[in-house]
Amino acid sequence: MATLTYRMEILSPLHIGSGQEYSAFDGVFLNGRWYLIDLEKVIEQSKEDPTNLANAMMQRDFSWAGWLQRRNINAEQVARHSTPCLQNPGNTRIRACIRDPFWRPYIPGSTLKGAIRTAILEELVAQANRHQRQQWARRITQRDDKGRTPDRRYVGRNVLERDLLIGRAPDKANESNYDLLRALHVGDSEPIDPDRVQIGLIWVHTLRNNQLVQKRVNGEEYKIFAEWLPSGVQAQVAIRLDEQLLTQYSTRLGFNDAQVKAIRDFAAVCNARAKAVMESEQSFYQDYGLPRIAQFYQGLSRQLQSVESKSGFMLNIGWGGGWEVKTVTNPLTEDLDEEYWDIRRTYSLGRRDSNAFPKTRRLAYEGNQPVAPLGWVALYPEEV
């Protein structure tokens, strides 16, 4: 079972969440950094009665900045840690990134493998004939005996994965034992220096009057702050392909030649998908008035050529990649207009008369300007 070590380089801000969020009660922004407050340190430094502190925090106008200043306490003295923060988050919540028990960020192998899985699934969908794709598209909108549609978060992945990524499993067998992706083992990345983490602004953009603008509804701004790893951060990842499973056990598990080829060629399959997404997104941003993001994708396409020349591959991972990255609906419904609209209608995915779908994107900001989409990475093999 050959193992390759890959050097992963982050190409655009990457946020992989822990599920935790910080509010204004959890920390304070001062001088370009956000300090996560440690209440035990606060009580130790201030000698404040815990009940009095709790009462103070219940006041509507409470802020750590003012409370600490009135007591001449430096935020560094009472912080668990601090993070560079590109602008003041104010009362906007901050999404925390995933970290190991030693507070070091890392890239979970499951995140990388999930993106590779989607690329392989798309490759196999694209190889199917029109009739087969039509059958899948129709099954995706079928309701169960209680009239419910499948979970909209997956938009038919359960149908496609069962047909394309699961071998011939006997009745009542555990399907995970017959999953094609058992042959691909992706480890977590090595831990990353916590000092590389930043907190940045991410704003949802939406189409309005044929232009892509910041989303605001009834005065609410659709933005968040998140801990992210910026472009340039690197980490090692181990990936190994179980050739024994693909050769000796392939027939027994029910994998066909197309499936085996797709997983063996996973790097090329990922690059083909990355190229398609880049071309689509570049055109979208150019058409709808954000040329800076279109230029980002143009540069990313050039970088893909260099990555391919070094036997590497590119992925979009983490939170915020959007519809194009998370689903395979577009290749599934190519030249199947009625089935495409039926899927959208079933899952309430926008109006049929809308100019484009999806009409929203999440973008990372620097200052007052959107500068990049989220989650692009390149992986270069260090042993070929």
Image (spheres, rainbow, N blue to C red):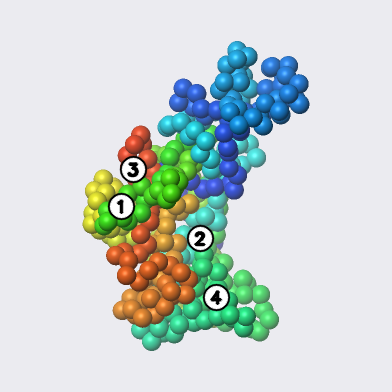
- Whether residue 84 is visible to the viewer of this picture, yes or no, is yes
Identify the residue at image location x=61%, y=21%: 67
Tell which circle, 1 or 3, labels the residue nearer the N-terminal end. 1
Q: Which residue is mark 1?
A: 212
Q: Nearer the viewer, mark 1 or mark 2?
A: 1
Mark identifier at residue 370: 3
Q: Does 106 sit left or right of 211 as displayed?
A: right
Identify the residue at image location x=34%, y=36%: 368
Tell which circle, 2 or 4, labels the residue nearer the N-terminal end. 2
Establish if 273 lies above or below 289: below
**Which residue is more in the foreground, 377 or 360?**
360
Q: Which residue is mark 4?
A: 149
Tell which circle, 1 or 2, labels the residue nearer the N-terminal end. 2
Quarter of the rendering occupied by the N terminus: bottom right
- Secondary structure beneath dot 4 equals loop
Q: CA distance from mark 1 to mark 2?
A: 29 Å
Instruction: Give percent across and percent down for residue 149.
Output: 55, 75
Mark identifier at residue 128: none
Tell which circle, 3 or 4, labels the residue nearer the N-terminal end. 4
**Which residue is more in the foreground, 194 or 94?**
94
Q: Which residue is mark 2?
A: 114
Say whether marks 2 and 3 touch (CB < 8 Å).
Answer: no
Amino acid on which disc 1 is placed:
Leu
**Which residue is more in the foreground, 130 or 96?**
96
- Secondary structure beneath dot 1 equals strand
Other residues around mark 1 within 10 Å, as few (<14) / some (14–19) / many (≥20) = many
Which corner quadrant of the image does residue 150 belong to? bottom right
Establish if 261 lies above or below 317: below
Tell which circle, 1 or 4, labels the residue nearer the N-terminal end. 4
Amino acid on which disc 4 is placed:
Thr
Establish if 375 lies above or below 126: above
